[in-house]
Image (tube, helix red, strand yellow):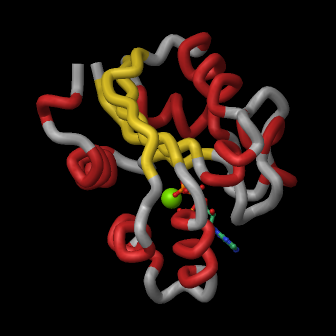
């Protein structure tokens, strides 16, 4: 079993898509081991995306991620990290495969509905950034 970290981003929460995204997650066989709705502060968004701090889109990305609530999730499954990235689809929805969450719901390359850890080391940073051990069941 492997765990990964996911976010349902502000563009999706604003459009009342939480349930539709969770349905895809559960239908694909992930177990939701942690889940909460919250609004990130600007500083919390910057800390989460610090690996992108030199990128030109960093400021806009942190504004977007903190403008309204998100749902943060810890997901468990065999091969969870890679399988969640596959279900999400490509960063730019124009390049995303049919059947992926981003193909179906993302607005554009920035407002792309979901986040997912991209490697075991990333998941190991991101899960405890949001969840204490007692919040994972
Ligand atoms: P995430 O990390 O959110 O799961 P990702 O791994 O597919 O997405 P990254 O390259 O890590 O993509 O970029 C992080 C986020 O930054 C993207 O999901 C998107 O919201 C935003 N982003 C990435 N590239 C661009 C860009 N060229 N212009 C605007 N925003 C971008
Ligand atoms: Mg990423």
The correct choice, above or below, for 23 with respect to 64 in the image is above
The correct choice, above or below, for 109 with respect to 120 in the image is below
Q: Position of residue 57 (x, y in %)?
A: 62, 81
Residue displayed at 64% across by 38% down: 88
Residue displayed at 52% across by 29% down: 83
Toward the viewer: 83 or 35? 35
Residue displayed at 65% across by 24% down: 19
Toward the viewer: 29 or 135? 135
Toward the viewer: 18 or 76? 18
The correct choice, above or below, for 8 with respect to 66 in the image is above
Residue displayed at 52% across by 48% down: 70
Toward the viewer: 82 or 15? 15
Residue 31 figure quarter: top left
47 displayed left or right of 8: left
The quadrant of the rendered image in which ligand 1 is seen is bottom right
Quadrant including the C terminus: top left
The correct choice, above or below, for 23 with respect to 63 in the image is above
Q: Position of residue 124 (x, y in %)?
A: 23, 47
Q: Position of residue 90 (x, y in %)?
A: 70, 49
83 displayed left or right of 93: left
Most extreme residue toward the left, as rendered?
Answer: 134
């Amino acid at each position: 079993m492997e765990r990964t970290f996911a976010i349902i981003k502000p563009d999706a929460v604003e459009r009342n898509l939480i349930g539709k995204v969770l349905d895809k997650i559960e239908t694909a066989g992930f177990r939701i081991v942690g889940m909460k709705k919250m609004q990130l502060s600007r500083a919390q968004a910057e800390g989460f995306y610090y690996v992108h701090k030199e990128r030109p889109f960093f400021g806009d990305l942190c504004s977007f991620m903190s403008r309204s609530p998100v749902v943060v999730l810890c997901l468990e499954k065999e091969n969870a990290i890679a399988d969640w990235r596959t279900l999400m689809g490509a960063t730019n929805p124009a390049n995303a495969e049919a059947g992926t969450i981003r193909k179906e719901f993302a607005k554009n390359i920035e407002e792309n509905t979901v986040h997912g850890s991209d490697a075991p080391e990333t998941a190991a940073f991101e899960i405890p950034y949001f969840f204490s051990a007692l919040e994972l069941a």
